[in-house]
Image (spheres, helix red, strand yellow):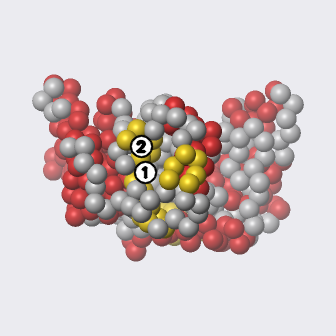
Amino acid sequence: MEQFIKRLTSKQLEEMERQFAIYVNGAQEVIPALELKNKIAKSIILNTPLKVKLGLDPSAPDVHLGHTVVLNKLKQFQDNGHIIQLIIGDFTGKIGDPTGKSTARKQLTDEEVKHNAKTYFEQLGKVLDMEKAELNYNSSWLSELNLEKIIHLASSMTVARLLERNDFSERYATGKPISLHEFFYPLMQGYDSVILESDIELGGNDQHFNVLMGRHLQEHYGMEKQIVILMPLLEGLDGVEKMSKSKHNYIGIDEKPTEMFGKTMSLSDELMGKYFDLVTDLSLEDKLNIKNELKLGKLHPRDAKMLLGKTIVNMYHGAEAADHAEENFKTIFQKGAIPTDIPERKWDGEKRIGIIELLVTLELLPSKGEARKMIENGGVKMNSEKINDIFTEVSIVDGMILQVGKRKMMKLKL
């Protein structure tokens, strides 16, 4: 690969370093970092945008902040004039990515893939400029492969190399079945990079094997190899597990501004720097300043968290909503007042009901077990009075207010 870095003027070198610093900030791994610098240098000298790829598995279209980690990194490339290659895996989605799975994934139908892809477009537009992004369905080239080409593709990889993947090796060691078609998922993902001639591919660090396959296959087909940027997985609100809706530790990008802000304020202080880096659209300079002031004690963690909450809400709902969410939080938690815009629910049920059944019926808690636990932990209030007895019988009156935890409130109307 030609060394374009050596051809840069001092001004061009400054621009290359500026872009490089932005792209590597927050990344867990860049493979290899020096080649990324050279790719940026080539782009500057030839005045040609880089092609930056992200493959999307259309089996899980509900986007939360954990998903936006790679999207925000893509946005940084897009803001610098590079081409974003979004690949909807409508063909590979029928196989299902085996990453992290102990059994074969359920194969999706054409209808399921199309529905999920449409949902993706709507949500990705909240982070990326979709009018400037390339949208690709990998069925347009993968469905055209004949058996001869598939065999040639398969010949580039050994079974031993595929079994290096933890999920495959664990299943093989424990005697769990591995279907032959699952081996083709990483090969097809890598082949996408061959067809699109991608310069860079992004992915979460759990995609290490899959995204490196693009480099391997591009070399196999005599092409310049792509750079791989792996982003860390974002811990959820519990500060331990990966953010996931199934673990109920997520912040959804479609959630109400007050809910987004409140959830952000519940984050641990230790996670703030990571969240500023990975899920906000602040400049690199601002991110570094915030983390430095926190380290030196010039910025109180509470104030930093308020800024983080406002920044996140502003990104998805606008400045006015961010200001309102901040004021709402201060009203409830700093002044101890009850907000005026509590969600209302018309009650048509019995006028006297057990507190646990009431909480579950109103969907304030998902189960009777969760309701019982919340009451025992002192997390349920009625008209600002804490309820301590799980056997409490409630007389429903117009305008009564129920509160669960710190953020969830509901007013009943008769």
Amino acid type of disc 1?
Leu
How many angstroms separate mark 1 from mark 2 (CA)? 6 Å
Question: Horizontal and vertical percent for residue 233?
Answer: 49, 39
364 lies left or right of 17: right
Asked if 323 appears above or below 215 in the picture, the reply is below
Tell me which residue sits at (22%, 62%) in the image.
319
Q: Quadrant of residue 361?
A: bottom right
- Is 144 situated above or below 26? below
* Count of number-bearing discs: 2
Q: Where is residue 265 in the image (x, y as percent from the top left)?
A: 32, 41
List the residue tagged with mark 1.
402
Percent position of residue 18, x then y: 23, 46
| Residue nearer the viewer, 241 or 40 | 241
Q: Residue at x 70, y 64 (%)?
A: 91
Q: How crowded is mark 1: few (under 14 residues within 10 Å), some or many (20 or more)?
A: many
Q: Name the residue under label 2.
A: 381
Look at 16% across and 46% down and name the residue there: 10
Label 2's element? strand
